[in-house]
Amino acid sequence: MRSVSVLVALLALATVMVAADRAPAAAAYAPLEWQLTFSTINKLLDNNDNWSRDDRYLVADTRETYGGGIGNSTSVMKVSITSGVETIIYAPKYVLDTVGSKQAPGLGAASFSPIADEAIFIHGPFVEEAQATGVYYGTRNRRGGVVKADGSGEIRFADMRDITSDVTTPGAHRGGSHRHEYTFQGNRIGFTYDDQLLQSYQRTIGYMEPVSKHPQGVDMWTALLIKPVLDAEKKPGDIVRAADDRWVGTLGQFRSFIGNVVEADGKTVTSSLFTVEVPTSVDITSSNSGTKTTFMTPPEGITVRRITSTPASGITAGSIDARWVGYRATAPDGSAQVFIANPRGSDKSADPAMLPIQASFLPKNADGGLRFHPTGNSVAVLSDSGVAAICIKPGPLFGTTTWLSKHGSDYASMTSDALVWSRGGKMLAFNRRVPTYDSTGKLVKDFNGNNFRQIFLTNFPDNNNNGIVDALEDGVIKNSAGYLAGTVAPDSWASVFGLNSDLAEKLVTATVVPLPLTLGNVKVDVTDSAGMTRAAQILFVSPDQINFVVPAATAAGTAIAKVTTYQGKTYSIPVDIQASAPGVFTANATGKGVPAAIAVRVSGSNQTPENIFTCATTCTATPIDLGPATDDVILLLYGTGIRSAKAVTATIGGTKADVLGFAAQSQYAALDQVNVRIPRSLAGKGDANIILTVDGVKANVATINVK
């Protein structure tokens, strides 16, 4: 009878705490998406706020139907989400040259108001204006047109454009505003801006408010939030460009954006995440609208913060409750993932609560379209040609992914983009490029020869309106080693994390091998995709967690783990089963930090084991000395979900490392071992991330230190 003490040590069962940074499994949910529109007209949602205030309609522009780009878009339409009926709500009387360079007016990037039955969108110069001035549609010649959504076509403008006055009319701008976004309460409109008069200044961001002093003939006073610095005058800390902006907080207390900032050498420019805090007490009329020779300046009382010192990308997102800013960045494994941060936070902060957090652990990159659920408990993002919802509520569900649409290589040709969550949080809309046919059955393409962009919808299954997918309410199953595989494998360690602290009466650990099928009156039965049910061996139970071995014969596909608690209550938890689902055990039992591994120094015929970590209140990496050139240092990594792999590769510190072998560790149930040689070129590297890739799937990232 073998002891189970090594397994207990590796799984750190007695000390496992449910931490917010442990993430992610993929929840099994039968995703449903459906095509809403079918006409031979492009319908671009374009990363705007397209849902009407009552969630009955979507608004879109029609660019690339008759000509390329926004300059050749001829109309703005609304679409009923129940019938798919398309209604033009604005089309100018005259449109100029839809296929040439002299375009007018140009329409695009439409958003519905959250407080009125009207939409705002980019509107370029009217035809008569363009012909009179010789200045046609362009990024520096547009403003926010507002139209009633009743089809009357009545147009007015949110902002004034003044390029003729020596001193710009107070509250006007002198260029092009675009991607207009209302706050959640409709009290402000944010926008991105390009200046017509002083074109050496790069793109920046601004906002509008309907104050009494606004210029005549328009609705609002316009001000910049960031005055970019000219390239010739830049110095460390200066922002030379700002864009990809969104409101954070119901009243627009913050504006998040990606800023191109000058680093300490005065030359390097990094695209980083920033926020501008704009208290409701700020007097927008304290801004300066500039002159023909001086640039606009922001109002008094705003605060600009740099959140990340490392690169960030994508259109940012903000939660309604102002808890979070969302953005894309590179994860330790090299993939693009979703990160969230406090809008007053910093990756340089000494306070852990103010540090950015990796929120997604998607097997493929997070591609864009980042959105927050109205509760702030989930985000949605496009990935792998589909829509993924990710729980970000602190606790055991944090980072758990649920696919809300079809995804994968079969849908790669149906380009997906422009994801937008409904105001009530029940549905999401997005664009796909799909084959479109006219009334005669003929396949028709858009102006550029592409399939038309159509609108698709999918549900967010959340019956109790808490912003968390219903399928997760019974709990979640994760890889016991890495906590981020997204799947589990047959004959591997898996963990059930419950939400109600009622799984077991108390902490109980098995003491015999074979492991029992019932422990503390708790059972786990796994029914696989072939309909076969098998009892799982259990090593550990507690009120919040169960660690068990996935039965070796479990078929690939969606399985259901039926958990019977010590009181006889049952939970049915879906889980995805794949042949390989790698996880690497770490010394801190978090799926992060130094691996629970040993190093073996091979010097001639001698092999000497060496510790690679030490533990006190936490476990830290012990520097590994690679020694003379005649020595080899081999890492013995322990994991799970690896034994059935066809191929395992590794990098350490970004350098390819030789995998000398991988197999089931024969002494202990479901435990796998991978032997990896540390490249000698890493001498002096310091901290180095280890990334195992098993049949194309990356394991959690562990970190060693190389002296």
Image (cartoon, grey):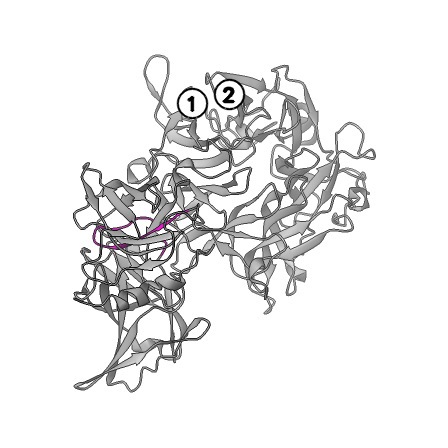
Q: Which residue is mark 2?
A: 79
- Residue 199's x, y, as percent? 66, 47
Q: Which residues are magenta?
A: 483-498
Q: Which residue is mark 1?
A: 36
Q: Is residue 197 above or below residue 101?
A: below
- Residue 454's x, y, as percent? 42, 26
Sequence-wise, the earlier of marks 2 and 1 is 1
Residue at 28% x, 50% y is: 488
Residue 670 at least partly seen: yes
Quarter of the figure with residue 170:
top right
For label 1, the crowd category at 10 Å Cα-Cα, with few meaning under 14, some 14 to 19 and many 20 or more, is some
- Residue 461's x, y, as percent? 43, 32
SS of the residue at dot 2?
Answer: strand
Alpha-carbon span between mark 2 and mark 1:
9 Å
Q: Is residue 112 above or below residue 642?
A: above
**Image quarter in which the C terminus is found:** bottom left
- Residue 325's x, y, as percent? 57, 48
Question: Please, what is the three-letter code of the amino acid marked with disc 2?
Answer: Val
As drawn, is 546 to the left or to the right of 517? right
- Which mark, by number, is residue 189? none
For label 2, the crowd category at 10 Å Cα-Cα, with few meaning under 14, some 14 to 19 and many 20 or more, is many
Question: Please, what is the three-letter code of the amino acid marked with disc 1?
Answer: Leu
Of residues 472 and 44, the one nearer the viewer is 472
Q: Indicate yes or no whether the magenta region holds residue 488.
A: yes
Residue at 21% x, 43% y is: 556
SS of the residue at dot 1?
Answer: loop
